[in-house]
Each structure stands twice: as C-alpha cells, then as structure tokens.
Image (cartoon, helix red, strand yellow):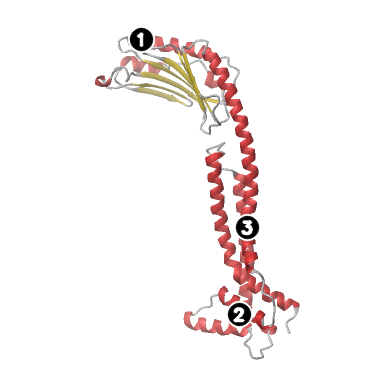
Amino acid sequence: MIDKNEEKMLKRTYIYASVSWIVLSAIVLGGLYLAFLSMIENGFFLLNYDSSFMGGIYAYLLIALIYVVIFIYMICHLIRIYRNSSLDNIYDGEGFVSLANLLKKEKQERKKRNGKIQIDTGLMKNKAREVMYDHNIKLPKIKFYVFAIIAVPVIILSSIYTAHFIDCKIQMSNYLKTAQKNLQIIENALQEGCDNVYSFDMDSDYQSFGYSISGYLYDGQYQSYISIYLNNEGIIDTVSYCKEIDISLSKEENIDLANRDFQTLHNLIADVDVSVKSKYLLSEPELNDGFVEDFKNGSYYEESSFYRSNYSLSYYTYQENEMNEYNIPYIYLSYTYY
C-alpha cells in the first residue's frame, strides 16, 4: 500500500515533471509582457522619455528570481528521485514494474547509449502517472498549475502598471495645467512688444515632447524673434534668440541690430513669473567677443559658431547664388538646460 507521504511524493514528482519547464517559460513570457507594458507607457503615458518605470522592472526581476528558485527546487527534487530511485518502496510489484525500476532501467540504457545520465522530465511524468493510475490516485490538475504559473506574473505586473498608469494620467493633467499657465503668462509678456506671437494650442492635450512659444519683434524681412521651449512638465528649459542678417548692411550694423533686438526681446520675458529649470536661461543675451570678431572678419557666406556649456551661438548662411527672400542668413543664440 502507498501511504500519504508516498502519495504526496508521487504527486509532487508528477507536478514538477509536468510544469518545471513552464516555470522558465513564464519568466520569458513575463519579460515579453513587461516589454508590452513599457510600450504602452512610452506610447501613451510618457512622462520622462529618458528613463523607464523602475518599479515595474524591479517587480519583474523579483518575480524572475523567485521563479528561478522554484525551478531549481523542482529540478533538484526530480534529480534526487531519478538518481537515487527513492520510490522503490511505493509500489507492490504485483504484475507491474515499479517506478524506481523503470527509472533504473532507463538510466542504464541511456548510459550505454550516451555515456552519461540525463534527466527526462517527460519520462518521469509518464511513469509517475502510471503508478498513480494503478493505485487509483487522482491525478493533480496540471492545467491549474500551468495557468497559475503564467498568470501570477501577468496579474502582479498588471496591478503595478495599472496603478502607475493612473498616477501618470494624474501627473500628465497637472503638467498640462502648468504648461498652459506658463504659456499664457509668457504670451501676455511677449504681446507687449512683439508684432506676432505664435504659441502651442492652449486647448491641446498633454505633449510628451514639450511645448513652445515664439515672439516676432516686427513684420517683414530680417526678422528678430525669441523662442521659448518648455519641457513636458511645463517648465522652461531652453530660450533662444534669432536675428536675420541683412547683407546690404555692414557687419557692425548687423551686430548692433542683433544686440539691440535680443535685448528688447529679453526685456519682455526677464521678469515673468514662470517655472524655469535655471535662472541662467533668462540671462541677458550676450554675443561672444570671439564670435563677433570671426563674424566681422569673415564673409557673409561663411558660417561660424561658438559653444560653451549650456550656451551656443552660431551664424548660419547660404552660398551667394542661393540667397533670396526665403534663404536669409541669421545669427542664432541659445541658452539650454541639460
């Protein structure tokens, strides 16, 4: 007769042999599901496009670690049974071959063929099932275990990411309100001195790439304008100035006009009460002396540039035969927060 402990040993052998490799498969499937959830986050709930949601990644790694431990435990149990034939005492041998003897026979044949012993979970599953059939032991419901093994990572990750997505939605709404408020303040300030102001649509939805607003000092050719860029949180992270160059004027006159117009544009936003990544972004626009000398000494058809940390200053131009009312050279000054 088979006692309760022996029955448990048989069921465990049958279950472990049936689902051990499913455990590893569940790790892979969990990784794919994590990637799917990350795609949803990046596509619809992108708050910080240079990083991922670490809470979900850590949860997956913990699940994977637990599953690896479970897999190792199952395999160790099967190896112990397979190598030591510890089920010798569970079978009465009347008209049947014991599971232990079947395993021993299989091991001997495989050792002759391959020179080594390899555990076969399929064989152990089949032989354990035969013994349970012969003793009227009810087979465990493997489908339940398979479903549970695969479902647990999905349920845990879904719960974590659902809470994360709800939080993202709330943050996106708050960031949009901040952006709308700051854009309105900047727009009002620019309208005090600019002929034209072009801004992000205030009624639009949240934008993961951020928002922008530009103020053009006057109409017509040889524009001077300022562009202010806000990140996805509605905070200013870049301020740039642009002055189109009139090549019919002298270099000195163009530099003087650029300094004058940049200063005028700066004065419009210097004291705005908005969120800014760094007060440095609202510094008075300054044309680097070295850049100015290169510009004065060079040709209108030669580009030049100067970079310093978060400050960049460039002169962009065209070949003489490309110059027209649409291709106008310009000086571009930018303050950027990295």
Secondary structure found at label 3: helix
In front: label 1 or label 3: 3
Quadrant in the rendering for residue 30: bottom right
Instruction: Please state if 305 lies on the left or on the right of 324 as rendered.
Output: right
In front: label 2 or label 3: 3
Which of the numbered marks, if any, corresponds to residue 252?
1
Q: How many residues crowd around disc 2 within 10 Å: few (fewer than 14), some, or many (20 or more)? A: many
The residue where tag 3 is placed is 151
- Residues marked 2 and 1 touching at CB (< 8 Å): no
Point out the image quarter for the N terminus.
bottom right
Q: In the rendered structure, which disc, 2 or 1, sits on the residue that comes first in sequence?
A: 2
Instruction: Please state if 160 lies on the left or on the right of 249 as rendered.
Output: right
Q: Nearer the viewer, residue 173 or 307?
A: 173
The residue where tag 2 is placed is 127
Q: CA distance from mark 1 to mark 3?
A: 73 Å
Q: Which residue sits at x=34%, y=17%?
A: 295
Instruction: Please state if 182 lies on the left or on the right of 223 as rendered.
Output: right
The amino acid marked with disc number 1 is Glu
Q: How many residues crowd around disc 3 within 10 Å: few (fewer than 14), some, or many (20 or more)? A: some
Q: Which residue sits at x=38%, y=12%?
A: 220
Secondary structure found at label 2: helix
Q: In the rendered structure, which disc, 1 or 3, sits on the residue that comes first in sequence?
A: 3
- Residues marked 2 and 3 touching at CB (< 8 Å): no
Q: How many marks?
A: 3
**Vertical comparison of 163 with 335: above or below:** below
Task: Mark yes or no: residue 27 visible.
Answer: yes
Quadrant in the rendering for residue 46: top right
In front: label 2 or label 1: 2
Q: In the rendered structure, which disc, 2 or 3, sits on the residue that comes first in sequence?
A: 2
Q: CA distance from mark 2 to mark 1?
A: 95 Å
Q: Position of residue 309 (x, y in %)?
A: 48, 27
